[in-house]
Image (spheres, rainbow, N blue to C red):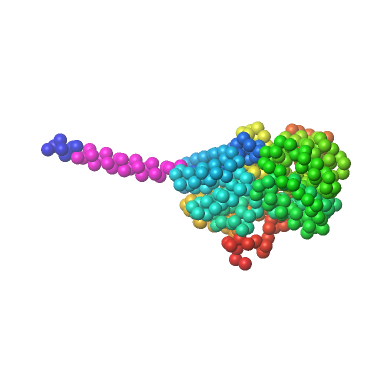
Amino acid sequence: MKFFKLSHLSLVLMSSLSALSSVHAQAVEPFKIGAIVDMTGVYSAHGGPGVVTAIKMAVDDFGGEVLDRPIEVLSADYQNKLDITMARARQWYDRDNVSVIIESTDSASSLGLQKLGKEKKKMTIFAGSASSALTNAECSPYGIHYIYDTHALAHGTGAAVTREGGKTWFFITADYAFGHSLEKDTSEVVVENGGKVLGKVRAPLFSSDFSSYLLQAQASGADVIGLANAGTDTQVSVRQASEFGITQSGQSLATLLVFINDIKGMGLNAAQGLQFTTGYYWDKNDDTREWSNRFYELHNAMPSMVQAGAYSATMHYLSAVQAVGTDDAEVVAAQMKETPINDFFAPNGKIRADGRMVYDMMLVEAKKPSESTSEWDLLKINTIIPGDEAYLPLSSSVCPLIKQ
């Protein structure tokens, strides 16, 4: 009988310890952030591993935990394929209990993620995609478009070039959602500023030869050849335009989406004089230099606006989670919108009801080789574009979240 009582007591103790262990395990379950990026493809230099590095920097700077849970960063290469993006996102949301996905992908994937996040009531932060539809017709209460969009790019570069005398345009456009959106927005800006679009041609992603497209643009006689593409596609088209002597013959190039990594890849001999709109430059002031130099130590390259923006977005998101005490997407999104952003990336930034983060953009110009004093001394800032002028006004939006 005594043996039975001891065994019973042991079983009770073991059961209690097991329950406590289970509760403890649940209490310390990691708080998971997912990063979907292009690791090796056309967008890898300005997004890719650098975005993952920036997110991990933010996690470390935040203290490594939130809501008394260690923060874990998951990452995946979407390989520039929508189906891979969606499969991984569903797995993260449904199986791995990921609280937020930060993307550095293309516009088609981001629009798919926007719909999935809305369906699952999960946060999604768009750091690398450009489509202005994300905060317009396709807006979501759980989606934040943090860095740039086609409307801001068009109104920065398109308006400036047209006002400076580039009245006729011919577009070489990446043949997918991002390129189409950028071409549309820029065309509207050109016409609004008294210009005219003479023609366009669509080029597939990962084109290695732009000669036929450039020859069509040259034959059009347009003042400006608008490059509505990005990444290595932009680099190849600019280098080939230089080789063909197109700019030397009087036509100018308008690179509508360019990153510092592209300028570095092209070299200043080919890139000099290019004007484009960006949301970040590492050498803007002491704060940008301080953060960028820390990033450089980890990544061996200065950050693009996508990489710097991913850090800022992660910090803003984690601060909101900590403030409201939950990762509930509706509550966190509301907190993010109510709280101003004031950091090295976006001084006086704010997130509107439609999910658009509004902050000042810059019209910059690639330096001449003779003007550059170091490896990453590549740009000069020509104009600051106030955020309220850069982004689509709420009065023009069809986002259903906006009370008209």
Residue placed at 63% from the left, 37% from the top?
41
Q: Does 366 sit left or right of 336 as displayed? A: right
User: Within the magenta stretch, is there residue 24?
Assistant: yes
Q: Does 113 sit left or right of 243 as displayed? A: left
The x, y position of residue 318, in whole percent, is 53, 48
Residue placed at 59% from the left, 48% from the top?
110
Residue placed at 52% from the left, 40% from the top?
74
Is residue 240 at all visible to an observer of this figure?
Answer: yes
Q: Most prominent secondary structure in the magenta stretch?
A: helix
Q: Which residues are magenta?
A: 8-31
The one nearer the camera, 355 or 109, is 109
Residue placed at 59% from the left, 51% from the top?
111
Is residue 280 at all visible to an observer of this figure?
Answer: no
The x, y position of residue 148, in whole percent, is 67, 49
- Which of the 4 image quarters holds residue 10? top left
Q: Quadrant of the C terminus?
A: bottom right
The x, y position of residue 328, in whole percent, is 48, 53
Q: Hey, which residue is sitting farthest right in the picture?
A: 249
Q: Does 172 sit left or right of 2 as displayed? A: right
User: Within the magenta stretch, is there residue 160?
Assistant: no
Disc count in the image?
A: 0
The x, y position of residue 189, in whole percent, is 76, 56
The one nearer the camera, 395 or 174, is 174
Q: Hey, which residue is sitting farthest left in the picture?
A: 1
Q: Quadrant of the N terminus?
A: top left
